[in-house]
Image (cartoon, rainbow, N blue to C red):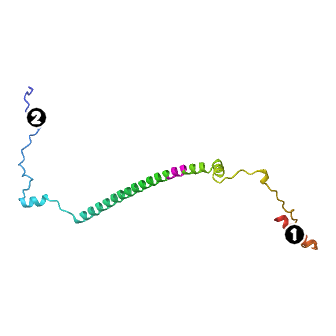
Amino acid sequence: MAARSSNEAYDFSLFEPKRQQEEPRKKDNVIKLPKERLEENRRSRLNPIRAVFGFFAMAVIVGVVSTIVYGQVQLTELTEQINQQTKTLTESQSVYTQLKMKSDSQMSLQAVENYAKSTLGMTKIEQSQVQPIELSKGDKTQVVQKGAGKNWLSSVWDSIMQFLS
């Protein structure tokens, strides 16, 4: 038998990639709207609850920020007042120190002695001006104790009280 040299026994078309058949063209998914409806769809709709919530949120934020700013302004003003009063205190202390030193120098013993000699005509005390005085002799006191005739029980009681006190 003769070998067949043809390929009729095999259908190679089954192994070839299949050609896609062109599907019928689908219609466009674009919807055409009239201009009025198009404008209506473009505008975003405002939700009144969301708007009220936004308003209150902004009001709270503005309130907090204004409170912080007000507090900072008050703090700055108080700091300036403290600095001004501190400066005034320092100047007053300096003036006080100067005046105290001046008064101390005017009231020194040497200055008082010079003033007494020159203006008042006073002199230092001399021995002839000293006059001795005699005081009475010291008075004597005597403590009289009561109860010299106490019994032995009272004296024990008094001893205990003295010991505890």
At 10% across and 34% down in the image, what residue appears?
12
Disc 1 element: helix
- Which SS does the magenta portion mostly show? helix
Seen from the viewer's position, the closer of residues 53 and 146 is: 146
Q: Is residue 69 visible?
A: yes
Q: From which residue to which does the magenta span run?
A: 92-98
Q: Is residue 32 magenta?
A: no
**Residue drawn at (35%, 56%) of the image:** 69
Closer to the camera, 132 or 19? 132
Please rate how many residues cluster around mark 1, counting C-alpha atoms within 10 Å: few if below 14, some from 14 to 19, many from 20.
few
The answer to which quarter of the image holds residue 22 is: top left
Name the residue type under label 2.
Phe
- Please give left or right for residue 106 compared with residue 32 in the image: right
Amino acid tagged 1: Asp
Query: Which mark, by number, is residue 158?
Result: 1
Q: Looking at the image, is mark 1 or mark 2 earlier in the sequence? A: 2
Q: Find residue 126 and report its horizontal and vertical position in percent.
A: 76, 50
Q: Position of residue 111 (x, y in %)?
A: 63, 49
Q: Which residue is mark 2?
A: 12
Tell me if residue 4 comes above or below residue 14 in the rendering. Answer: above
Left or right of 20, for residue 119: right
Q: Where the N terminus falls, by quadrant?
A: top left
Whether residue 144 is situated above or below residue 135 in the rendered picture? below
Assess disc 2: are there few (<14), some (14-19) or many (≥20) residues with their C-alpha within 10 Å of its C-alpha.
few
Is 124 situated left or right of 136 in this image?
left
Q: Give how far across and how far down residue 25 sits, in percent.
A: 5, 49
Asked whether the viewer can see residue 11, the reply is no
Q: Residue, x 9% and y 36% (percent of image)?
A: 13
Q: How far apart, in angstroms, are the residues tagged by discs 1 and 2?
A: 145 Å
